[in-house]
Amino acid sequence: MDSKLNIVTGCRDGKSYLKDVFVSPPFRVIPVGQLKKDGAAYLMITSSSPGILSGDHYYMDILIEENARLQLLSQSYQRLFNMDDHATQNFTVKMQPNTSFFYVPHPIVPHENSTFISTNTIYIEDNCEFMMGEIITCGRKHHGEVFKYNHFQNKTQVIHKQKLIFKDNILLRPQAIPLDAIGSLEEFTHQGTLIYLNTKNHNTDDSIEEIFEMMSPEKDLQFGISSLQNDGFVVRVLGNGGEQIFDCFQKIQEKMWCVKSKIV
C-alpha cells in the first residue's frame, strides 16, 4: 500500500505552527506540546497500522518555512513485519533559512524475514539546525527472533545549497554477514545513530565534550562521538536495550534543542 504524509510548518509572530497537513491511511498527525513555552511546533506522527507490512511504501514530505522550529515525535516502536517481498520509506525534509528540525523516533523492531529500505533526504539552508536519530533492535528477542530479518538499509543525506555535506548508509544483512561476529556488533543486540548538524557557524566541540560526560556513566553501553567536517557530530551507540539508547538520545535532543546559538 502506498501511504503519504505531507506537513508544512510556518511561523507567525514568533510562534511556529502546523500550517498545512495531508495524510492518507494509516497516518495521522497530532499537535502536542501545547504547554511548552518555547514557541516551537511539536507534532506526533501516529498510525492505525500495527507496523509496516510487505508491499508498504511510505512517502513522507516535510516543509519547514522560514523562522519555524519543528520537533517531530513518534507514537511507539516501529515494527517491520514478516514479508514475502519488501517495504520502503522515503522521508524528505526541506528547511528554509533560520529553521530547526529535530526527530528522534522510537526504536525499530525488524521481524523475521523482513526487508526494509529507507531513504532520508534533507535539504537545509543557512542558519538552520538539524537532528535525526535511529535505533535498530535485533528483532523480537523474547520470541527467539534475534537477527532473523533479511535486509535492513537506511540511507541519509543532507544537502546544503546543492552541495552534499553529509551522507550515511547503514546496511544490515544478518543472514549474509552475522552481526554477532567479531568486528560487528559482537555481544550487543541494539545499535543507534544520532546525527546533529547546523549551518549557524556554531561550533559543537563543547557540546561533544558535554555529551561524552553525560553518557559515560551509562552501563552496558559502548558509544563514540565523531565531529563532522561541518558544524555537527554523529553519536554511535551499541547496547542491549532499545529503551536505554532511546533515553540517551532524548537527553541529547533536549540539550541541543535548548542551546542558544550565537550567529556569526
Image (cartoon, rainbow, N blue to C red):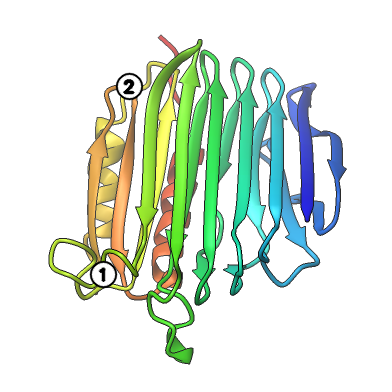
Please give the label number shown on residue 230: 2
Please give the label number shown on residue 35: none
> Quarter-wise, where is residue 146 in the image?
bottom left
Where residue 108 appears, x then y in whole percent?
A: 52, 64
SS at mark 2 in the image:
loop
- Residue drawn at (30%, 65%), measured in percent from left and top? 176
Note whether 75 is above or below 89 in the view shown: below
Of marks 2 and 1, which one's residue comes earlier in the chain? 1
- List the residue tagged with mark 1: 178
Task: Give the amino acid at mark 2.
Answer: Asn
In space, the residues marked 2 and 1 are separated at their CA atoms by 34 Å
Where residue 71 appears, x then y in whole percent?
A: 63, 43
- Residue drawn at (76%, 62%), measured in percent from left and top? 47
- Residue drawn at (41%, 49%), measured in percent from left and top? 252
Residue 206 horizontal side relative to residue 256, left or right: left
Seen from the viewer's position, the closer of residues 146 and 159 is: 146
